[in-house]
Image (cartoon, coloured by chain):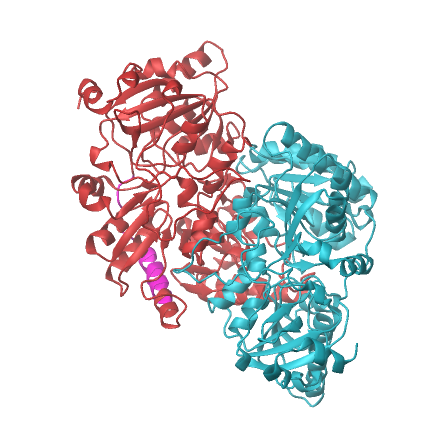
Chain colours: A cyan, B red
Amino acid sequence: MSPVSASTTRVLNAALERKIMSAEEAAGLIRSGDQVGMSGFTGSGYPKTVPVQLAKRISEAHFRGEKFQVSVFTGASTGPELDGALAMAGGIHLRLPYQSDPETRKRINSGEMEYMDIHLSHVAQFVEYGFLGKLDVALIEVTAVLEDGRLIPSSSIGNNKTWIDQAERVILEVNAWQPMALEGMHDIYYGLEAPPNRGPIPLTSAGQRIGSPYLQVDPKKVAAIVLTDSPDRNSAFKAPDEASKKIAGHILEFLSWEVKKGRMPANLLPLQSGVGNIANAVLFGLEEGPFEGLTSYTEVIQDGMIRLLKSGKLASASATAFSLSPEMLTEVNAHMASYRDRIVLRPQEISNHPEIIRRLGVIAMNGMIEADIYGNVNSTHVMGSRIQNGIGGSGDFARNGYLSIFMAPSLAQKGAISTIVPMVSHIDHTEHDVQVVVTEQGLADLRGLSPRQRAHLIIEKCAHPDFKPLLADYLDRAERLSYGKHTPHLLTESLSWHQRYLRCGQMKPKQEN
Amino acid sequence: MSPVSASTTRVLNAALERKIMSAEEAAGLIRSGDQVGMSGFTGSGYPKTVPVQLAKRISEAHFRGEKFQVSVFTGASTGPELDGALAMAGGIHLRLPYQSDPETRKRINSGEMEYMDIHLSHVAQFVEYGFLGKLDVALIEVTAVLEDGRLIPSSSIGNNKTWIDQAERVILEVNAWQPMALEGMHDIYYGLEAPPNRGPIPLTSAGQRIGSPYLQVDPKKVAAIVLTDSPDRNSAFKAPDEASKKIAGHILEFLSWEVKKGRMPANLLPLQSGVGNIANAVLFGLEEGPFEGLTSYTEVIQDGMIRLLKSGKLASASATAFSLSPEMLTEVNAHMASYRDRIVLRPQEISNHPEIIRRLGVIAMNGMIEADIYGNVNSTHVMGSRIQNGIGGSGDFARNGYLSIFMAPSLAQKGAISTIVPMVSHIDHTEHDVQVVVTEQGLADLRGLSPRQRAHLIIEKCAHPDFKPLLADYLDRAERLSYGKHTPHLLTESLSWHQRYLRCGQMKPKQEN
């Protein structure tokens, strides 16, 4: 589709049509020092041309010896045309929240870029409350501009409502690649006032709609509209590996047990699952499992969820973004009408809101980098100092959900790293927020257990046999020699596994190999 | 007041009156292995005679060589007649949640007692959901039993509603020492269904009432009623020391600044403050400060809050318990009628509910044991392994509040310990949940800052001059030598301050003294 036809079909408001300009011109409206709220959540719905042109401007300014940097706030991770391009140009001063771009990660970990890792449910309100300073620009991808100026959102919502409301100037990318059939799938809630005027959010089931399918924008704030025709760049689908399948198996067995014991309804409670291989494996497992009439209240719609919707096992899915493989995207775009009634995309302040997560009783299933024997979980930092992607929404769901499950294979780096360690090198989810830990070895149900009881169980159920004796030895000595015996630790040794990895490339001491 | 007159005036239901028996007889209804939900929150409203008799039974059983232990669930901390007596007898298998009894703490840290430290807002629902097994007995102090069998709660509510609803057998202590004028002050919400049937909690302001002033109990479950006439044992009031006053000063200055910048209404937002000296100092500061029409949505009503109510600065206070000095208690009991309209006591599942805390926009102010340079906070463990009291509700408020403030003097143990350390030895509140750190040295506003920016600010504003150069040196070397530069750490050194304290009794290296 050419920009011209996009213009005629996708920008139906005459006043706004006059704001159409090139990506280069639009990028010219962004100034050094600006704080820019951009759309985008897990590779969906991010602006695809203005950031590239902005990166070009920044590079040219740097080439001339001028300083040019912006702060970039998003929904979560985006695509290479946004994070990649801007990071490569050295154009980002501060980035928040979640990111997963290799170039961005490199710059953050080399100390060249400031990054602030905050809960996804906090982002919109922190900006609204003024905690992060003034938002200068909102740069938002949409599917279309209606005659009355309302906007059809694209494949993610994230913080778009807040960016548009809070920013001084708004730049829209109208992406003709996004199917018009998305219209009606979104649910933008405009009732969330700031305290002290906030009332209850009237959402009581995962698939319910409480808002409008459209974003509103004050036309006077719209500084530019750019026409694009570019695909989202999501990752290709990878079939679950053996470890993921085993983890999924343990979780499904556990959920069946919970139903049997009367601690959960037969159709479970709304499912949240993080992104990735293991999460998909769990969803695949549910496809063959005994549960019917499932619901999902989560951040992203992955391939596995579409399959569950297709098979009829999943009644409805709520999220803030799609995160589909190209093949699945083709399928969904072709049959959008049949999915539209069963999928709701919401602002992330609603998809991740503590009030709703607690009320619905969400089952939170999230990946982790490592867990320690006491059930503290590290989701973000490799060896305590190197950020991976960020906490995302895992804290929103784990803290306020009905049950919080954390999962990972028991080994990483071909066995050099044990996922279960004496003490994690960074904590994102404390002992108070982790109820179940799962690896391919097994599942540890930590509910009702003291730290020492948890430690014995996690070692027994979750640790890889290669590391089990080492962990048992640590715990045994800590139980005898620790200063306090509530959470026994030998501080001279508690982080020694990580130290050894940094020194020798493996966590195991030499004599153990 | 004698037991007899208590009987005639305080147990007005004829059927229940027939259940009156001695504490010794009632204690005889509790079996080894029972899980017992007891009333009590910060030294208020705990059962005062049955636990003592139970401890006696347990001691006698142990003397005979028989095993006798129970699991004790409460609201939070209690008094020496409960935690102290039972711990001393070795009668507690598992204790949860918050506790502050010296004997209990000793047993936990010697490894003789299992203790599970969970968020106060989780306790009731974990029992209701069946996560902690069956609740055998509820042992609850009340002020009176009405003709129709409803109960007037006493000076704390805690988890009493849930214990009474969930337990197989109920034992009531009717305490004639509690003033009858408490009637009407409580607000027991019976509308909180378990997911998937949970709806919004209709509470939209701190002082609002949404439930009943009375607890309900199925009379068939009442196994015993014991008449008592014993005072709550709360701590004596200590006037704020210099460090506390300075901390309070920094916080008040900060809040004034937030109002000035339009980030908070002129009457602030509902205040939550932890227990203790610093919290009281903040409340005292508010008494002389510029703010009018304040509200409070917190766990406990302390002396400072009563003074604020008296002066008219505080319009209303919501909590789950009183925690007053004996002098202030006399004052309140004498003028209960004048306070009753402005104080609401709620179940802790409501006082600490994420939904309400987020909606009202509570300003969370909590004490801490230590914070690290990146803003992670340890609220519970001394030197990583020895439990102090527990996390209490600090996580409920910090995570879901409008602003989370953590506060402590910059030094402990006469200067041997620095409250600001390179890496905390245990984490209860992660970098994602801490917005402001305050010591008597100053206040660090961490909003919008990356970890490295936070580290420089915390060292500059909060660290004691004795430790500032050591922290700056650590950070400087970590910024150069760390594996990743996002959260720079030297893992061989990050816990060395704690190690040194355990070895030498002080955190500073010898040559620095």
Q: Is residue B253 magenta?
A: yes
- The quadrant holding residue A511 is top right
Image quarter where the N terminus of chain A lies is bottom right
* In the image: residue A285, left or right of residue B27: right
Residue range highlighted in magenta: B235-254
Q: Position of residue B465 (x, y in %)?
A: 44, 63
- Near-viewer residue (B274 or B56): B274
Q: Position of residue A33 (x, y in %)?
A: 57, 80
Q: Is residue A495 above or below residue B8?
A: below
- The quadrant holding residue B152 is top left
Q: Is residue A481 magenta?
A: no
* In the image: residue B99, left or right of residue A3: left
Q: Position of residue A430 (x, y in %)?
A: 57, 46
Q: Is residue A509 above or below residue A191?
A: above
Image quarter where the C terminus of chain A lies is top right
Q: Residue at x 26, y 26 (%)?
A: B146
Q: Residue furthest bottom?
A: A64
Q: Residue at x 71, y 54 (%)?
A: A339
